[in-house]
């Protein structure tokens, strides 16, 4: 959503929902999707892929990810048209399909993933500057954490002043976000070495089987595609509901072409093992090999500007989810408050606090950037799975009068493929990140209980009790696994 405010409706981002709020056009919604997906992830793709797979595995991985995410894009397109009364996208679909508690989980999980994702931005910025300031290391030193913390709270106070000021800054980063990536692809093609590309095709010895190579890249592809649902999150601000789905598909296809290109052309510049050893942002190291030092500086500057814009946008998007959930009485009512500047300040405070906690945790991680990246992806999968499952539910529903299925065969196929894809991603994430996700999810039930008590309801339904028991059990196992060293950060 980094470009969400470009072209209109800065007030919409804050989410007051008033009738005077400007409406978003197809172009603006498409820019929201593109801006949401183009952030820190793309600058890290060469190294992340080279750590796991060669050219063949990368092509297969992008094929699977592209198809799966396109199915999810179609799901959001279908739901936007079929359920125009549902706002806030992922969260609203999960609630409508499976009840209040799963809906709350989807809202919290999506919000938490955005907060963790924001941490990757600061880690990557510090790693970039760390190339000339060794004290910052790979973004995981004490100094890096302290400086990142100042950045976190500095942006909080900027946004607190009002979204208009934030939007004005955001317009500046639009070009800086796209140009370095396109220049990278063009220069890499110009310096492309067919022999190096051929050597990288099957993958290095450390990569393992082709299946393992593909599986190892799945979470990385999820991370870079986060934001495909950006238009759905702001669906209540769309000028026309059908534009939400169109923007989702158009934005996805544009970004998919760019991301796949960045990955594949890198294999024609350096051997796979050398790419895997580059410091992040690895795109800078690849371009330095191709054209010299200026290429590294060019990408690094573009990255810092781009990532700061992406951080601003995702902070607003995370707050929007909490705000809408509070308005729907699925979060405590204090999260639905806005300031005189039309900013949901309590939601922004919670967003910044969780990002701060995760930032501190990254200091104890073996690989701060990859840990935050994978956790972001894992937290997002449950909301995505619930949204896809809701689309299946709608597609198979029968008309009470005629007994005929309401959804078309095409809608059912798309929804089923999207559901299978997200389920496979949970498997690809591995037990480690599933358990860590439960550790994050389980304590959130306190917010759900607070919201229910505000409505005078204190009891859980049998289905809600089962979900609560599973989440608590998963969290307990996760904590034990961390304590005894079965899994590590």
Image: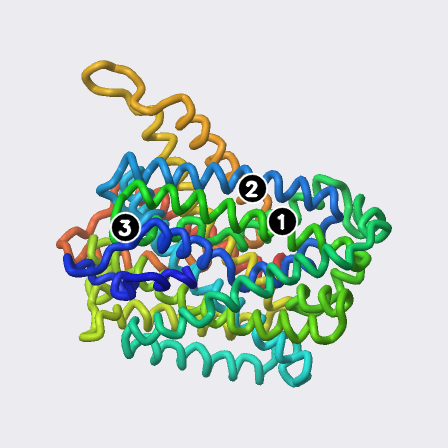
Name the element at disc 2.
helix
Q: Position of residue 4 (x, y in %)?
A: 37, 60
Q: Earlier in the sequence, mark 1 or mark 3?
A: 3
The residue drawn where x is 56% and y is 64% is 179
Residue 256 located left or right of residue 59: left
CA separation in Å, label 2 and label 3: 26 Å
Looking at the rendered image, the disc whose residue lies closer to the viewer, 2 or 3, is: 3
Residue 155 located left or right of residue 199: left
Counting labels gives 3
Name the mark on residue 445: none
CA separation in Å, label 2 and label 1: 9 Å
- Looking at the picture, tell me which residue is in the foreground, 422 or 299: 299
**Mark 2 lies on residue:** 66
Name the element at disc 1.
helix
Q: Position of residue 203 (x, y in %)?
A: 79, 48
Name the mark on residue 260: 1
Residue 275 located left or right of residue 234: right
Q: Is residue 192 visible?
A: yes
**Quarter containing the C terminus:** bottom right
**Mark 3 lies on residue:** 238
- Looking at the picture, tell me which residue is in the foreground, 16 or 142: 16
Q: Position of residue 85 (x, y in %)?
A: 22, 42
Mark 3: few, some, or many residues within 10 Å (few <14, many ≥20)?
A: many
Q: Are marks 2 and 1 in contact (CB under 8 Å)?
A: yes
The residue drawn where x is 51% and y is 53% is 377
- Looking at the picture, tell me which residue is in the foreground, 358 or 287: 287
Q: Earlier in the sequence, mark 2 or mark 3?
A: 2
The residue drawn where x is 52% and y is 68% is 176
- Whether residue 449 is situated above or below residue 80 in the rendered picture: below
The residue drawn where x is 44% and y is 58% is 36
Mark 1: few, some, or many residues within 10 Å (few <14, many ≥20)?
A: some
């Amino acid at each position: 959503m980094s470009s969400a405010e470009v072209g209109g409706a800065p007030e919409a981002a804050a989410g007051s929902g008033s009738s005077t709020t400007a409406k978003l056009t197809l172009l603006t919604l498409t820019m929201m999707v593109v801006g949401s997906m183009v952030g820190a992830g793309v600058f890290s793709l060469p190294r992340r892929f080279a750590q796991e797979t060669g050219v063949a595995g990368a092509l297969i991985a992008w094929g699977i990810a592209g198809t799966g995410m396109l199915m999810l894009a179609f799901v959001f397109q279908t739901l936007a048209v079929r359920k125009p009364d549902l706002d806030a996208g992922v969260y609203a679909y999960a609630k409508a399909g499976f009840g209040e508690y799963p809906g709350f989980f989807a809202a919290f999980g999506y919000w938490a993933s955005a907060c963790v994702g924001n941490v990757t931005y600061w880690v990557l910025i510090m790693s970039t500057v760390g190339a000339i300031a060794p004290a910052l290391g790979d973004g995981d030193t004490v100094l890096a954490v302290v400086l990142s913390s100042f950045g976190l709270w500095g942006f909080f106070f900027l946004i607190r002043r009002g979204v208009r000021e934030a939007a004005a800054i955001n317009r500046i980063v639009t070009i800086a976000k796209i140009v370095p990536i396109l220049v990278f692809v063009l220069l890499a093609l110009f310096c492309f070495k067919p022999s190096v590309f051929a050597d990288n095709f099957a993958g290095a010895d450390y990569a393992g089987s082709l299946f393992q190579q593909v599986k190892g890249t799945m979470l990385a592809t999820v991370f870079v595609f986060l934001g495909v649902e950006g238009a759905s999150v702001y669906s209540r601000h769309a000028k026309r509901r059908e534009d939400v789905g169109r923007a989702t598909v158009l934005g996805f296809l544009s970004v998919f072409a760019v991301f796949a290109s960045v990955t594949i052309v890198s294999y024609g510049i350096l051997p796979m093992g050398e790419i895997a050893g580059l410091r992040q942002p690895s795109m800078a190291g690849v371009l330095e090999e191709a054209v010299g030092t200026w290429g590294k500086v060019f990408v690094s500057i573009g990255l810092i500007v781009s990532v700061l814009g992406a951080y601003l946008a995702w902070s607003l998007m995370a707050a929007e989810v909490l705000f809408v959930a509070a308005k729907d009485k699925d979060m405590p009512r204090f999260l639905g408050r806005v300031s005189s500047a039309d900013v949901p300040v309590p939601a922004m405070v919670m967003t910044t606090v969780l990002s701060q906690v995760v930032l501190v945790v990254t200091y104890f991680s073996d690989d701060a950037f990859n840990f935050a990246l994978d956790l972001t992806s894992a937290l997002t999968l449950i909301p995505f799975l619930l949204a896809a499952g809701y689309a299946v539910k709608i597609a198979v529903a029968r008309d009470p009068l005629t007994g005929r299925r309401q959804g078309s065969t095409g809608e059912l196929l798309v929804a089923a493929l999207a559901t299978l894809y997200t389920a496979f991603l949970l498997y690809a994430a591995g037990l480690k990140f599933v358990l860590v996700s439960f550790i994050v999810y389980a304590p959130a039930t306190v917010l759900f209980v607070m919201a229910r008590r505000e409505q005078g309801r204190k009891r859980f339904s049998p289905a809600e009790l089962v979900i609560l028991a599973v989440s608590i059990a998963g969290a307990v196992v996760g904590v034990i696994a961390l304590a005894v060293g079965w899994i590590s950060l």
